[in-house]
Each structure stands twice: as structure tokens, then as C-alpha cells.
Image (tube, rainbow, N blue to C red):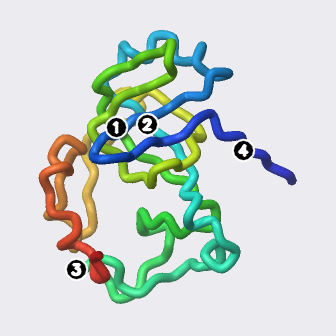
Amino acid sequence: MTMQLKPIGKINCQNGQFNIQVDEAYRAGLLEVNQFDTLQVLFWCHYMDKKEMRSMLVFDQPYKHSPEKMGVFATRSPVRPNPIALTAVSVLNVDAEAGIITIPYIDAEDGSPLLDLKPYTPSIDRVKNTQPPAWSAHWPTCVEESGEFDWAAEFVNAQ
């Protein structure tokens, strides 16, 4: 099986400003996106797209309170067999003509290739009763609270 991904734009993260730039060929797809206050963004972690990183499946303790070893599928690490990232973002503004979606923050690198956008819809995307592992139970329960949380203090090898 051969698979082919084609970026539809890129993520811009410069000087504390964040936006999603949709290539001109795909801007018609932004029609009515401005009706949503939250989007799911799929992007390629291009700095992690290395053969040796794609084969890493088990990691030493990534979070201070987590188990000593964790499988890649139990983490949100950008080091993955396919370095695809998914994150929810709040929408501040949509300029469909220019192809720019202004957002307050995204956990992407500047220039990350944009793979897809999907509207966040609570009827499909929200899980009402979910139970995180005990070691991460103190993490924020929603994206709105995550911005104020000291994420750096959670990682074993915080930069």
C-alpha cells in the first residue's frame, strides 16, 4: 500500500503570534469555517521525520509522575512511526480570502506542514466521562485551562 500526503498549508509561529496559513488552492474549503470557535489541526512534525525516530516505540519516563517506561501510543510525543500531530485550537479570526486563521497558540514548530483542518464538534469529539491515569490527573481538563498550566514542570527533560 502506498500512501501520499500533501500539505495544504503551514503553521506560522513567530514572535508570540500564531496562525494557520492555508494554501490558495485550498482556500475555498474555508467557507463557513468562521462559524466554529474551535478547530482540530493535523500537522506534520517535520523536525521529527527521521528514520531512527520513526522506529522509536518505547521511551524512558517522559513526565515526572508517569511510569518509568511508556509506549509511544501512550504519549503525545512528536516522535512517532508517522510524525502526525493533532491538536485543538481556539479560533480568533478567519480571513478566508487570505487563507489565514488566527489562533492564540499551537504546539507546533514554525513552518510545520498543515495536513488537514476539521471543526471541533462536541457531539463527536467531546468525551463526557473520561478518566486519565492517576499520574496525570492534576493536568488541566480543557484546552482553555492549558495555557496557564506550567507544562514545562511536567516533563523530565524540560528545556
Q: Earlier in the sequence, mark 2 or mark 1?
A: 2
Label 1 amino acid?
Val
Q: Nearer the viewer, mark 4 or mark 3?
A: 4
Instruction: Check disc 2 and give the amino acid type.
Output: Gln
Residue type highlighted by circle 3: His
Q: Position of residue 73 (x, y in %)?
A: 50, 67
- For the residues labelled 2 and 3, the Cα–Cα distance comes to 28 Å
Name the residue that disc number 4 marks. 5
- Secondary element under disc 4, as helix, strand or loop, is loop
Residue 72 image point, x, y percent: 50, 72
Distance between the alpha carbons at the discs numbered 2 and 1: 6 Å
Q: Are marks 2 and 1 in contact (CB under 8 Å)?
A: yes
Dot 3 or dot 1: first in sequence order is 3
Q: Calculate the distance from the C-alpha at mark 4 to the C-alpha at mark 3.
A: 36 Å
Q: Quadrant of residue 92?
A: top left
The residue identified by callout 2 is: 40
Kindly indicate whether the residue at mark 1 contacts the one at mark 3 (C-beta within 8 angstroms): no
Local secondary structure at mark 3: loop
Give the numbered dot on residue 65: 3
**Lateral position of residue 20 relative to residue 26, left or right:** left
Please provide percent x and percent y for residue 88. Answer: 37, 40
Determine the CA span between mark 4 and mark 2.
17 Å
Considering every residue shown, the one lying at the far front of the view is 15
Q: Position of residue 119 (x, y in %)?
A: 44, 26
Which label's residue is closer to the chain start, 4 or 2?
A: 4
